[in-house]
Image: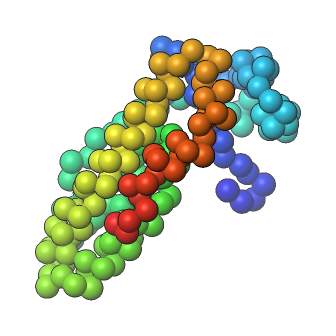
Amino acid sequence: MGAGHTYSFAISIESQFHDPVEGRLERLRVQFAGFGPRVQEYLAALKRDDQIICSAMEWVPVTEVYRGRMVLVGDAAHASSPMLGQGGCMAMEDACVLAEELQLGATIETALARFAKRRKPRVEWVQQQSLAVTQMQSALPAGRRTSAPRETGDRATRARFAALVAAP
């Protein structure tokens, strides 16, 4: 992320709960104590409870990505869970598709309508796949959640992302 900051996320398959900031780092270290050395090094590098944000992953459905001459792109238009790691990619695709449509469109309104129509299927696919991965992970027993990616990782990743290879 820059400026000495990193971003990572972990999923705890539990019902929604409130996690007080005080003691959060120690609770996280205990919860992930059985994980490998990279996880332990990462957690050891954290120094304060407030470096960790715990929150539920929620979907914010957006049905209208433009109004008049204003348009939403990236997570503002189509946030989803980070399970596919596509947030930044989708934002860059939005920018490219929007630029193409603005270049081709007779009016801004026409370009924005074409942009929204063109992006919708791909955005919905990414959101559905992200949700599917989350549901799949939550259905697996704890031990399988960590071993399954190692066993099928490359093959599963290539299959999961195949639909994103084509230009938007």
Q: Is residue 17 visible?
A: no
Q: Quadrant of residue 142?
A: top right
Q: Is residue 113 left or right of residue 137?
A: left
Numbered marks: total: 0
* Residue 89 x/y as whole percent: 48, 60
In the displayed structure, does residue 120 sit left or right of residue 96?
left
| Residue 94 rendering spot, x and y as whole percentages | 36, 65
Residue at position x 38%, y 65% in the image: 166
- Color scheme of the displayed model: rainbow
Question: x%, y% of residue 134?
Answer: 46, 30
Residue drawn at the location 40% of the way across and 34% of the way down: 131
Q: Quadrant of the N terminus?
A: bottom right
- Where residue 72 sits, quadrant-wise, is bottom left
Location of the C terminus by quadrant is bottom left
Residue 34 drawn at (x, y percent): 78, 20
**Residue 66 in the image: above or below residue 129:** below
Nearer-the-camera pick, 11 or 73: 11
Image height of 142 relative to 3, above or below? above
Residue lying at 55% horizontally and 45% vertically, measured from the top left: 155
Residue drawn 78% across and 54% down? 4
- Seen from the viewer's position, the closer of residues 120 and 143 is 143
Nearest the viewer among 148 and 145 is 148
Towards the viewer: 66 or 145: 145
Examine the rendered structure and indicate whether residue 89 appears above or below residue 58: below
Question: Where 135 falls versus 88 (above or below)?
Answer: above
Q: Can I make out residue 150 in this image?
A: yes
